Image: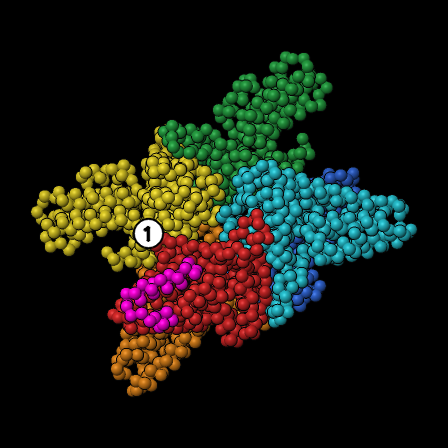
Chain colours: A red, B cyan, C blue, D green, E orange, F yellow
Amino acid sequence: MDLEETARKIESMDIRGAAKIARAAASALKSFAMDYDGSDIKQFRDELKMAASRLISTRPTAVSLRNAVSIVLKGADSAEDLVMARKNIATRAEEFITNSEKALNTIAEIGSKRIKENDILLTHCNSSAALSTIIKAHKDGKNIEVYATESRPKRQGYITIRQLVDEGVPTTLIVDSAVRHVMPNVDLVIVGADTVASNGDVINKIGTSQIALCAHEARVPVMVCAETYKFSAETLTGEIVKIEERDVNEIVRQKDFPKVRIFNPVFDVTPPEYVDVIVTEKGVISPYAAYEIIKSLNSDS
Amino acid sequence: MDLEETARKIESMDIRGAAKIARAAASALKSFAMDYDGSDIKQFRDELKMAASRLISTRPTAVSLRNAVSIVLKGADSAEDLVMARKNIATRAEEFITNSEKALNTIAEIGSKRIKENDILLTHCNSSAALSTIIKAHKDGKNIEVYATESRPKRQGYITIRQLVDEGVPTTLIVDSAVRHVMPNVDLVIVGADTVASNGDVINKIGTSQIALCAHEARVPVMVCAETYKFSAETLTGEIVKIEERDVNEIVRQKDFPKVRIFNPVFDVTPPEYVDVIVTEKGVISPYAAYEIIKSLNSDS
Amino acid sequence: MDLEETARKIESMDIRGAAKIARAAASALKSFAMDYDGSDIKQFRDELKMAASRLISTRPTAVSLRNAVSIVLKGADSAEDLVMARKNIATRAEEFITNSEKALNTIAEIGSKRIKENDILLTHCNSSAALSTIIKAHKDGKNIEVYATESRPKRQGYITIRQLVDEGVPTTLIVDSAVRHVMPNVDLVIVGADTVASNGDVINKIGTSQIALCAHEARVPVMVCAETYKFSAETLTGEIVKIEERDVNEIVRQKDFPKVRIFNPVFDVTPPEYVDVIVTEKGVISPYAAYEIIKSLNSDS
Amino acid sequence: MDLEETARKIESMDIRGAAKIARAAASALKSFAMDYDGSDIKQFRDELKMAASRLISTRPTAVSLRNAVSIVLKGADSAEDLVMARKNIATRAEEFITNSEKALNTIAEIGSKRIKENDILLTHCNSSAALSTIIKAHKDGKNIEVYATESRPKRQGYITIRQLVDEGVPTTLIVDSAVRHVMPNVDLVIVGADTVASNGDVINKIGTSQIALCAHEARVPVMVCAETYKFSAETLTGEIVKIEERDVNEIVRQKDFPKVRIFNPVFDVTPPEYVDVIVTEKGVISPYAAYEIIKSLNSDS
Amino acid sequence: MDLEETARKIESMDIRGAAKIARAAASALKSFAMDYDGSDIKQFRDELKMAASRLISTRPTAVSLRNAVSIVLKGADSAEDLVMARKNIATRAEEFITNSEKALNTIAEIGSKRIKENDILLTHCNSSAALSTIIKAHKDGKNIEVYATESRPKRQGYITIRQLVDEGVPTTLIVDSAVRHVMPNVDLVIVGADTVASNGDVINKIGTSQIALCAHEARVPVMVCAETYKFSAETLTGEIVKIEERDVNEIVRQKDFPKVRIFNPVFDVTPPEYVDVIVTEKGVISPYAAYEIIKSLNSDS
Amino acid sequence: MDLEETARKIESMDIRGAAKIARAAASALKSFAMDYDGSDIKQFRDELKMAASRLISTRPTAVSLRNAVSIVLKGADSAEDLVMARKNIATRAEEFITNSEKALNTIAEIGSKRIKENDILLTHCNSSAALSTIIKAHKDGKNIEVYATESRPKRQGYITIRQLVDEGVPTTLIVDSAVRHVMPNVDLVIVGADTVASNGDVINKIGTSQIALCAHEARVPVMVCAETYKFSAETLTGEIVKIEERDVNEIVRQKDFPKVRIFNPVFDVTPPEYVDVIVTEKGVISPYAAYEIIKSLNSDS
């Protein structure tokens, strides 16, 4: 799959989910580097940058995408010649993908310990990190059940319920509006994150923040599963995470309601006070430790 | 439209909404009485009771339906002969319908005074009382805007947005999950009620309670518009308002997800602490005054 | 049992619980009237008043005791002669006792409808009204479980757990400090009341208010079961319900800790915002309807 | 003092405070009636109405003023001739003034019982009902202290502190911004009310609502002292209590800050959830009982 | 005292309190090492490990015990021969004990600065760190008073009140249920901690969390005093702090209530939102800084 | 301006604001060092210390003042001779001033990104950091409006409104009591800080904490702008930030109210739970990251 194809699939949401997008972009940069048939390192760098821009443009507000691209791109910085530059890009892309998958496993390992026998969980949308954690607990022999929301407008809940019942996890589908009604039965809310800001705000699929609010109202803990490359260093310098708005026809055909404004924000912001823990591959933290994570990322990379 | 036809339309939700169901039932009882061609008052009373039971069975948890039927049925109690009994039933049915419509107008009149110039409102589902109130404010020349939720699974929000834009009210459609995200822009939440319990609980379309919670979190007042025949005297004697569950295929086809449990509750319970006022045809009250209203209803009828 | 004996048993808490104290006092006044062997109605009234004072002095802060005595005493007011006065006192005492028992049954009948299949309840101290309600639900075939607190210092929880297991209700004993720890498992808190004030405050066994707070924090409803003679008309005119302090040796022997102050308040005040419903024999109300109840009591008696 | 003079003094706030304004208006109507030298009852009624309008126009948002005028005006309705009409007006005005003063005393009597030995109170602005209550407790020999706010812009706090120290009550003056800072020392907040709405909202001097919020945050009870003629029947029919805006030069001279907008609202709205009790001459109620009070007023008058 | 004796005393709670257990275990390991009369370092290490396991088994959920044992055990890792290994164990044990005591003093020094003249404190159970802090403030000449809870079931409050009155601190004993009732008089809650989790959860004696909730409701700050070896690195990797359950006969004799389930959890979890500061020997921190402390511990040791 | 003159102007509040005071003190120390005409380094150090003490005594509770003085003073520590010592002091003073101004710009740069088009802001008192941030957003072309409080007793709001309208920012002045009333119109609260404590408490101008409370109640974010030299390392070791009390005549002339106690605290404490972000020159953090900042300051300097 070449870079443009990857870009298009991210745009159309055939490739979806912060982690999958990030890995697809890394993979596309690797392909780009491997397939490059020019001979000039400067030109390579320029074209690589354009390729990177193209990828970022597909979901311009996705921090994991930007983080992935930025990590891979550094491979070309220090390279002395084109061969090394192409090889570095490929290596970094592979490493990113490997680390990303390893992080997912670590999160599942860590997070699943916080799921207790007979827990009834609730999840929203379709997060790899959240579902891996749930499935790990199930595979460890814990007797659990899951409520999954439909997750309008794109109904990613359908993917979630398929994955869960395929693994044998007893699963109940509800509409997004039924969350507060079922909350008294829920023991733990588990969701993913698109972005974590330096003050601990969690940006995730639209609806997450009202689920977290309903959980907080009922003293139900909220566990966010998020790889550290979803933590946004840009928020440290004041950037507000821009909430992407997608095509309103995802909700209903505009032409059927010509005079109605349709508003389709993809994410919302859950304040840290409604999140008990974020499970990262570095461990279980309070959302207020986001500044710590971002600082350590900066010093790592 | 004969009684059985009315009953079926209520079952299928072709006739929808607490007030419309109540009036349709009253009307059906009137038709039943007018069309009755027997000659025995005792037999009339027995068949009338069966007719009433048939109507109530269509939405067994709808308090307004039960209240309407019960008010009309009293017409046969004191009648001395069949002619008078049939006439009484017809008269009471007409009165109920007239009073119900008058109540709607009074609520719109009263409630619209609480809508201020430049207010941005948010409504859920499709409540006659709430929409009449909004439209009254608009017709009084107030510059207002409305956010309307989709209201899954039946998407009554589509009816709402059509009604509002047909009246010229600027309207924005959102998915149910986007409520907390838009709440900082909202000045007033206006919803209807299916039932009001003696302690002030408001039972309304699934999702209402999390909207009220989001409003309360943001200090946005919540106004419930409800005719007094939606106040449930049965809750005074301990009955819990049973939350109707409807066909799960309203959400998604069960056969497409054979191993998934689908849960489709129609209503939820909003506690009185999240409701600022209930506007009834008797005036603006706190939800905690529900006991008062129920007591006065008992002494009225 | 003569009046003085009754008075002493109330003082020593051999007769305990707002309802039992009230009935015992009514019964003692009846005995006093029946046994009276004087011949002067004026003298009878004077001695009756002294008898009443003696009874009230045993638990001077108990509103149900004062209400019972006051209701019975009215029997002597309008009587024309001594025979009638003695008879009236006896009749009113019997009526009070009968009504009190009937109220208990009505509360159990009403309140038990609010207990759902598989509910896990939590109760505190040893309230006839609360336990009757729980046992009624159990006898109706509902599968329920109960957490009961020890209720230091007098450990009335021991009586409660005996009553519950004797009825076959699965029961778990916890210390008072464990309430917040078990609250996530609890579906409904059921307690009695010593007094209900005109603004809705519920005065009950020390510890009730922190249980209600823990319930509110976890969105667990709190149901108070209270006969209407526990509503205090005196609070309407500004009286603050005085919190009785009992012998500190109920907690620990003072002589073992000579330099320590020991503080033994018997009751505390639960604000109405933490109480979902009060179940009275007049129906299910919000605590904020207390003013209503008190007004209707005044006009009834 | 003739009617126009009274009207001007109300406008200039030489006559201030909901109760004083109401009594002054009643008194002015009495003078108007007594001094009337026409001979036609119809003309009298017309001029009386104009006089009433003039009085109401001085503080058009003051419910106690409107209530007072409306109560007095009824005196002319049923009168058969001019003599009787003038006499009725005078009588009703006197009665209103007497009842108003009696209500103040009753409130002080009732409310002061809720002040406990060693209580530290906090009050805002200069409310007769609140101060009478505080001074009654002091005169009853209770050892109390009071924090009084400055109450910008008109600094009615200066009047308050003079009245309190003149009575010998230890008093501390703070700026309005220092309320939350001193709240941990406070045992009870006592304020008056300009208006009480049918849902329990308390409209009072600007700043009251944030004091109540600070009190609620610190579990300090808030007691509102308000005669029942401050309860607004108009709110029952949907009227929103209009918040009066006064001359901005009360804050600072506009000409000193020509480009700055100055906003000078006189009142704000305290939601009932932050008010523990309202003390009226009819007793201690929850703010949620406002509907009850308003209904009883309508049936009384 | 040999290792087995120490182990038994920890099991029986003759040695109690997280800090004392930790020091006793360190001391027992030192004795074990000093008394060891074998000659093989490998065998020494094996037996040492068994000794460590025995100690840990006494209170398997106590993080301070595990931390102490783990710190001491490292002494054998790098030792080249048996002599050095035994000596290292002894040295590390002594250091642990010294550091633990120094930490206690530092905490008392730091924490006592946050106690103000005339403060009324409330403490629960019997925490060395909390009591040292209180006594330090008292010795510094501050006029303070303390409410101490009974702390059922083991009534460690009796030890607390003896220690406090022996030091001359005015102390009042209350039952655990009376906490919310006295909270309006309290200026500061001071408790210890058994464990602090990586997200800031404080695990401490059963009842602590509802005390913290009551404090938070009344805007009373909660200060936790905890040495950093009570911070659990294991929680970082997902372990949930297991709440120890002890013999139910600590509450009441099971045989007296054969059909009753008795539940005796020793600890509960206070969420960080109810804790204002944790005072450690490293300084005053927010509970949300727990991740920081755990990371620095890992890099220290 | 010599040191004594600077000291006096700080005392009289002619020089006001945490940042300005800090820079003035640094500048005064520089002047002191440059003007020093002695010849003995030891004596220089002694006199320097006295000069420093004099400066600190002017506002003994101002952490930025102490931090500035302490940073500059270090210049004399390592100097080998008097020449170098004087030069070092001058250099460090200049650096402090430069860094302080740079920090202000960085904060404005970062913080202004969080202000959105059409935002309505509210600010309190007169904070350079907050105003720079607001003005930066305005200069970036964002359409914003500002509510500014009067800020009794010193009315620093007058300075604020002048600065804002001079820059062309539409500004509305309100009294301090009107904050909760206007809060529903506000999108963002922006204030400065006098001190930030190690647990995240923000100490700022009296009134800030109730503004933050009102904002939190209405889900309006609170942004604190504070240079890192306002973070207090002393709070880490237990010091409580002492709240300065100033001359009561700032509020009203004591002699006009001889029997009234007047209380004039200058600052109050806003708990971190009401603060969404602190913008420092090191980035956007949660207030709970204060410990991090303080630790990094210690290691920096």
Q: Nearer the viewer, residue F83 or A104?
A: A104
Q: Residues within 10 Å of mark 1 (few under 14, many from 20)?
A: many
Q: Quadrant of the N terminus of chain C?
A: bottom right
- Magenta-drawn stretch contains C91: no
Which residue reaches farthest bottom?
Answer: E39
**Magenta stretch prevailing secondary structure:** helix
Residue located beneath label 1 in the image: F280
In this view of the protein, can residue E203 be seen by the observer? no
Is residue A13 something one can see in this rendering? yes
- Report the front residue among F275 and A238: A238
Q: Amino acid at mark 1?
A: Thr
Q: Residue furthest left?
A: F39
Picture quadrant of residue A168: bottom right
Looking at the image, which residue is at 42% across and 72% down? Answer: A101
- Position of residue A207 in the picture relative to residue F160 (left or right): right
Q: Nearer the viewer, residue D5 or C232?
A: D5
Magenta segment, which residues? A31-60
Q: Nearer the viewer, residue F202 or F168?
A: F168
Residue D165 placement: quadrant:
top left
Tell me which residue sits at (24%, 45%) in the image. Answer: F23
Residue B202: percent from the left, percent from the top?
Answer: 63, 51
In the picture, the quarter occupied by the C terminus of chain C is top right
Residue at the location (35% across, 80% down)?
A: E48
- Say whether residue B238 is left or right of residue A179: right
Residue D113 in the image, given as x and y percentages of width and height: 55, 39
Picture layout, residue E58 above or below residue B54? below
Query: What is the x, y in percent for residue C284?
Result: 67, 51
Q: Residue furthest front?
A: A38
User: Vertically, is E33 above or below D161?
Assistant: below
Local secondary structure at mark 1: strand
